[in-house]
Structure formats: C-alpha cells, structure tokens
C-alpha cells in the first residue's frame, strides 16, 4: 500500500519549479509519451504552456508556464484524468505508462477499484490511490526504468515464436508468408513479447529476417545467421499500441495469454486472430496437458478479440461454436469469418548440393529406384502416423517395395514412441527415412521426388501438407472429413476413413501399383487452380484487418473528448506530488531488486530445473528435439548461468 505523505513530510512551497527526481526521469519520459493520448497536453521544455497539461497544473502550483511539470505533477494530472474518464482504454494506457508492464484483466480491475475509492477532488489522494493499485504490477517489471514507444493507429503483428525461432511448420508458414507480403507495401509494426512475458518489443536483427525474408534467411549457414545479430537497444523498449490492430496469427504462449487477453478486452486496441483449429480442446485426447492448458488460456484472448478468420470453413465452424458458448457470459465474442489458406508449395531457395547428397544417401543407394512415399507432419498421435506404419509393414510383407520418408518433429515422448514403432520395420529392411529439423529446400525437393504423399490426420484446421503436395501436382492420400475433405474436393486426392487402418493400407497399395489411377490423380492435381499466398494475404487483410480498423475509427470518434478533471479542493505543492511518486517508485525498485536476488540464489536456481524441463517439453512439441535442446540451453545460460 502507498501512503500519502503527511504534512510533516511535505516541503514548503516556494513557488519555484521543483527539480526532477533522478529516480523518476525514465518514468517521466513514459508519462510524457502517453499524456497526449489521454487528452493531457504536455509542453516541451522551455516552451510556453501550462505546467500540468492542457487544463492547467495538476497540483495548482507545479511550475510556471516557461517550465514543464515535474514527474509528480504530470503523474497526478494523468491520475485525475483517468479517474474522471473511467474509460478502460485510458486506464490500461496509464497502467502501462507508469509500470512498463501490460496488465491482466484482473490487475486492470484492481487498479480501477483502487482509483474509485478516492475522492476526485483530492489530487494527492487520487494519485496515491492509483499508485497503490499499480504497486503489484510494477513489481512484475523486469526493468522499471524501461523506455516505451507508443504506436498509434498501427497494424501490429505479434510474431513472438516465428520471430525468435527457426521452427517453420504450419502456423509459422502462415505468419511468414502473410507478413512478408503485407510488409512489402504496408506499414507494419513487427513485435514479440519480451522474455518475461510482461510487454511487447519490436523484432530486431535476424528476428525480422525470419518473418519477412524467410526464404533467404533459411538458406543461410549457422555462421551467416549469427552475423545478422541485434543492433542497438531496440529490445529494451516496450512497444505500446494505441487504437491499433494487433494481429495474432500464432497461438499465444502460456505466459502471455493473460496480458494479451487484457489487451483485447480493455486496451482500446482491436485484436484480430487467425483461427487455425481448436484441436487442443476438441481432440484433447491427442494432446499433452501443457498444450491443452495453453490453448484454453488462449481462448480467453479469443473471446475478447474483435475478429477471427478461420483458415478453412471447418476451422471457422469451430471458432463460431466457441463464440456461441461465450455469449452465455454476456459477451458478444468476435465476428468469425473464413479465409481459406493458400495452396502453394513452400517458399524456399534450392537445397545446397551437400544437403541433397546427404538426404539421398540416408538409406543407401540400393533403394534409389524405388518410389518415394512422403509423409509430412509432426510426429504426434493426431497425425495418425501409426496407420501409415502399419500399412507400410503390410505392404512390405506383400512384396511391394518403396521408400517411406517422414519429415517433421514432435515432443520428446512423442518422438521416442514413434521411433520405437519404426524399429521393427527397419529391422525387416523397410526403407524408412526420418528427417527432423530439415530445411524448406529439402522439403520442397522431397515433394518433387515423391510419387505421392500420405496425410490421414484425424483432426486438422487446414492441412498445409495436402495443399503443398497438390500445388506441386503430387497426388495425396488424405482423410475424408473436415478441412481435408475440403482440400480434396478439387481433385488429385484419394480420400479414406483415417480411422480404418485397412483403408489406409489399401489406398497406399493402389497408388503404388495402379499406374492408371496414379496418372489420373496426378493429372487432376496439375489441372487444379490454386489460391496463392498473394491471394490469401490480400483477402486476409481485407476480411480481418480492415473491419477492425474501421471499428476502431468509429470508437476513436466517440472517445475524442476527455472529461475535465475536477478542480482540487485546495492546491497541492508539486514537491508533495513528486515525493509521493518518488516514494512509490523507490519502494517498487527495492522490491524488484530483492525479488531478483532471491530468484537468483542457488536454491532458486536449483528449483528452476522443473520449469526448464516443462519449457523443453513444450518447445520440443513445436520445434523438434534438436532445436528445443538448443533453445533450452540458451535459457540455461541466460537464467541459470547468468551469461
């Protein structure tokens, strides 16, 4: 709790401007950035203007027209303005300005209640009430002196995972293909969440390359990627969106779901979401508990968002069903539309000769004349790879020869179980390759080499491997339901009941032995006309981003006027306001320092092994074991070793 200074603590007013506290210079800079967006005009140093903002001094004696107000006076003016306006967006912006932390919905509500208990005519009391409510929030800040960058009326792309990882499966492909096209002719703000999950920052260096120039970046060697390091201190600056569209193509991480939900619900920004699927809830039996919890938390973001664009009609149906459910809470939920993904091959530069040679020799030269059956997708139960393994074993025993190549990663336990399932077949001599952490160039070469692909998934939001295969004229065996049936309707596919192992086996046998059927399906695929990534990016912008921009424009017009704060019952010296702010800020910094020391003690470091293991399991599911191990080691160095 923040106590207001007593009369004995208050220095006598001299009528002169009060020197700014060295402790609150950074805080004052943040307040100066948010003040204009709250209707509080702050004059620059040396220019004429009122000391406390557009409506006079916050305390009545906070300086002269020739001097800008000290941090305390400005803080009090903002507190009074927010107390009077009672707008959620104003309060959210004030919280971020004071703390450099994005609040949760519960934290926002707690600050609102604290402010509401104050007397609006008591300037010092209002400031003390606001600071009291903010105290728990600023203690979560990794850098209470952090700078901020306010971006107004912008389109903000949250590329946390795609920007910070070399992983490139379905969701990351969608983000990179879309953002790279938008970035070519539109002004975008590319951001990610900071390490602590407390606020957003701009992407920097190779993070930007990963998002808007993936084809070139992915072709670089490890040493070449290192050269594209960060420059400057852009990672230390918190990006604060105001009246902006925040586009979420990825699913939020567990640590950022709560502040992102608040950003959607109370910040005055509009969150626009690409809905891939609801698999972790609808098909929870195939997911690990961590993934289920992460998606469940993400649904809190969804229910407060402005708009959702499903990647297929099936995905849109799943999200529309969720919107129907949240209406029982009295919430309108987002508008849901369907914007089907492109059906294009992966964007990649040609594979280097050495890489191609390594892939060709992975199962020996004796099998080179055999047809390649390609399976693309993470090795998890939902992808139904067990049916493919069963079919391959049956066909091999029947004397049908072929190569079977799996491309994809998975969780540690999932990969271990999958590899164990393959070993009996490999001992029998079945030509099986498993490529993990491979490049898009190798993936593209594999599609072109394949006789056909197999993708009998039990639940998909879209099924990019089906689209990519068909776009290259390669026939596909896939499931006869949901989004996969949607993709198959144009031809080139043999659809099966994915839950019937015999149906999968028979389909693979037909495409390996029936040249007439194979040729017909290949011709169908080659005749198809496919949506390009250019088509998708253009339609997504018009159907997802533009409607949210229009809604924000209408809201901005309605909120253009901020109410006049009431005149204080009696003037409060600026030194008193500054003392209140200094006391609060110094206490917060001391608490943060104490918490940091405790967190970095040897006992605490030892306790971090468990969450680190959880981190590894979560990342390995998305990235594969190799990349996840590298990511985990970075965490070890940064958090446990301190380097």
Image: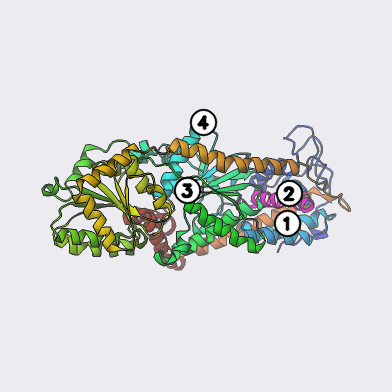
- In whole angstroms, how far apart are the C-alphas of marks 4 and 3? 23 Å
- In whole angstroms, how far apart are the C-alphas of marks 4 and 1? 42 Å
Magenta-drawn segment:
81-102
- In whole angstroms, how far apart are the C-alphas of marks 2 and 1? 10 Å
Q: Is residue 147 left or right of residue 474?
A: right
Return the mark for residue 311: 3
Return the mark for residue 75: 2
Nearest to the observer: residue 72 or residue 616 = 616
The mark lying in front, picked from 3 and 1, is 3
Residue 354: quarter of image: top left
Residue 413: quarter of image: bottom left
- The residue that appears at 43% across and 40% down in the rendered structure is 177
Q: Which residue is mark 1?
A: 130
Return the mark for residue 185: 4
The mark nearer the N terminus, 4 or 3, is: 4
Which image quadrant: the N terminus?
bottom right
- In whole angstroms, how far apart are the C-alphas of marks 2 and 4? 39 Å
């Amino acid at each position: 709790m923040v106590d207001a200074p007593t009369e004995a603590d208050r220095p006598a007013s001299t009528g002169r401007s009060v020197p700014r506290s060295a402790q609150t210079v950074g805080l004052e800079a943040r307040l100066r950035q948010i003040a204009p967006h709250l209707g509080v005009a702050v004059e620059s140093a040396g220019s004429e203007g009122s000391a406390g903002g557009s409506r006079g001094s916050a305390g009545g004696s906070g300086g002269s027209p020739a001097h800008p107000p000290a941090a305390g006076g400005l803080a009090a003016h903002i507190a009074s303005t927010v107390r009077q306006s009672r707008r959620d967006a104003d309060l959210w912006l004030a919280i971020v300005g004071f703390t450099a932390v994005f609040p949760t919905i519960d934290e926002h509500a707690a600050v609102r209640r604290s402010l509401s208990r104050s007397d609006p005519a008591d300037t010092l009391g209002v400031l003390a009430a606001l600071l009291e409510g903010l105290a728990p929030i600023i203690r979560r800040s990794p850098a209470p002196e952090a700078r901020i960058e306010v971006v107004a009326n912008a389109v903000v792309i949250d590329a946390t995972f795609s920007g910070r990882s070399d992983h490139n499966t379905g969701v990351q492909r969608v983000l990179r293909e879309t953002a790279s096209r938008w970035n070519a002719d539109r002004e975008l703000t590319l951001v990610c969440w900071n390490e602590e999950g407390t606020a957003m920052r701009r992407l920097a260096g190779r993070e930007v390359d990963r998002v808007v120039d993936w084809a070139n970046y992915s072709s670089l060697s490890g040493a070449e990627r290192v050269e594209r390091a960060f420059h400057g201190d852009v990672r230390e600056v918190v990006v604060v969106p105001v009246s902006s569209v925040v586009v979420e193509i990825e699913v939020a991480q567990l640590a950022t779901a709560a502040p992102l939900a608040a950003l959607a619900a109370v910040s005055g920004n509009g969150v626009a979401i690409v809905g891939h699927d609801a698999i972790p809830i609808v098909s929870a039996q195939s997911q690990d508990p961590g993934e289920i919890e992460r998606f469940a938390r993400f649904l809190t973001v969804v229910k407060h968002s402005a708009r959702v664009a499903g990647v297929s009609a099936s995905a849109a149906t799943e999200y529309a069903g969720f919107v129907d459910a949240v209406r029982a809470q009295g919430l309108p939920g987002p508008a849901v539309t369907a914007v089907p993904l492109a059906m294009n091959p992966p964007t990649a530069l040609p594979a280097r000769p050495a890489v191609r040679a390594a892939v060709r020799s992975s199962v020996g030269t004796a099998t080179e004349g055999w047809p390649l059956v390609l399976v693309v997708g993470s090795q998890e139960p939902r992808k139904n790879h067990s049916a493919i393994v069963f079919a391959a074993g049956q066909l091999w025993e029947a004397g049908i020869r072929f190569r079977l190549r799996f491309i994809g990663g998975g969780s540690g336990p999932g990969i271990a179980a999958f590899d164990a399932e393959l070993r009996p077949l490999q001992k029998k001599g079945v030509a099986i390759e498993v490529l993990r952490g491979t490049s898009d160039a190798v993936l593209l070469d594999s599609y072109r080499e394949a006789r056909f692909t197999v993708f009998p998934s039990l639940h998909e939001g879209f099924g990019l491997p089906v689209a990519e295969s068909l776009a290259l004229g390669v026939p596909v065996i896939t499931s006869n339901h949901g989004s996969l049936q949607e993709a198959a309707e144009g031809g080139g596919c043999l659809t099966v009941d994915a839950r019937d192992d015999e149906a999968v086996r028979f389909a693979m046998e037909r495409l390996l032995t029936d040249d007439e059927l194979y040729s017909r399906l290949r011709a169908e695929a080659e005749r198809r006309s496919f949506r390009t990534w250019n088509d998708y990016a253009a339609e997504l912008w018009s159907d997802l981003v533009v409607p949210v921009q229009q809604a924000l424009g209408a809201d901005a017009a309605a909120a253009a006027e901020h109410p006049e704060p009431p005149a204080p019952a009696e003037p409060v010296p600026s030194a008193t306001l500054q003392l209140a702010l200094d006391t609060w800020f110094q206490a917060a910094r001391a608490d943060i320092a104490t918490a940091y020391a405790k967190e970095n003690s040897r006992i605490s470091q030892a306790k971090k092994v468990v969450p680190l293991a959880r981190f590894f399991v979560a990342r390995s599911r998305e990235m594969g074991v190799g990349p996840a191990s590298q990511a985990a080691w970075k965490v070890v160095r940064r958090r446990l070793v301190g380097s």
